[in-house]
Image: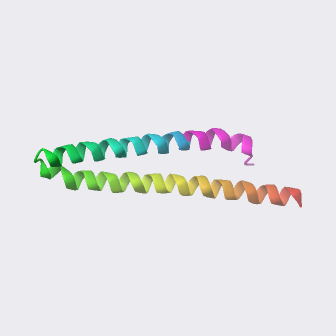
């Protein structure tokens, strides 16, 4: 059975992963802008694809966290009834 005590390490790990992925996205954006300003235009499309993939992963992780929280709240309401 899922409990809040079991969920805390999971949510913490996912939050750290989301933060790390956001930092990677910022780094990729900075490198892309630097490359574009230096005249290296072939870097834009691969960087854009990676940005979209990372954004999708972050969205999926966020969706999982919210769904997990909803499940725990539903279980808590049933227990209280």
The residue sitting at 70% across, 57% down in the picture is: 71
Q: Position of residue 70 (x, y in %)?
A: 68, 59
Q: Specify whether residue 9 is painted magenta.
A: yes
Name the residue furthest right.
81
Prevalent SS, magenta region:
helix
> In which quarter of the view is residue 75 placed?
bottom right
Name the residue furthest left.
39
Q: Coloring scheme of the render?
A: rainbow
Q: Nearer the viewer, residue 33 or 6?
A: 33
Count of labels shown? Answer: 0
In the shown orientation, is residue 36 left or right of residue 66? left
Q: Position of residue 47 (x, y in %)?
A: 25, 51
> In which quarter of the view is residue 64 placed?
bottom right
Q: Position of residue 55 (x, y in %)?
A: 40, 54
The part of the chain drawn in magenta is 1-13
- Quadrant of image for the C terminus: bottom right
In the shown orientation, is residue 64 left or right of residue 20? right
Q: Specify whether residue 73 is painted magenta.
A: no
Q: Nearer the viewer, residue 6 or 34?
A: 34
The residue sitting at 14% across, 52% down in the picture is: 42
Q: Position of residue 62 (x, y in %)?
A: 53, 54
Position of residue 33 relative to residue 60, above or below, is above
Name the residue furthest front.
37
The residue sitting at 42% across, 45% down in the picture is: 22
Q: Nearer the viewer, residue 71 or 25?
A: 25
The residue sitting at 74% across, 56% down in the picture is: 73
């Amino acid at each position: 059975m899922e409990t809040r005590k079991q969920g805390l390490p999971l949510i913490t790990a996912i939050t750290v992963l989301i933060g790390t992925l956001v930092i990677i996205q910022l780094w990729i954006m900075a490198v892309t802008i630097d490359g574009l300003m230096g005249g290296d235009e072939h870097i834009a499309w691969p960087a854009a694809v990676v940005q979209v993939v990372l954004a999708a992963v972050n969205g999926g992780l966020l969706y999982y966290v919210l769904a997990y929280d909803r499940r725990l709240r539903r279980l808590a309401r049933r227990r209280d009834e």
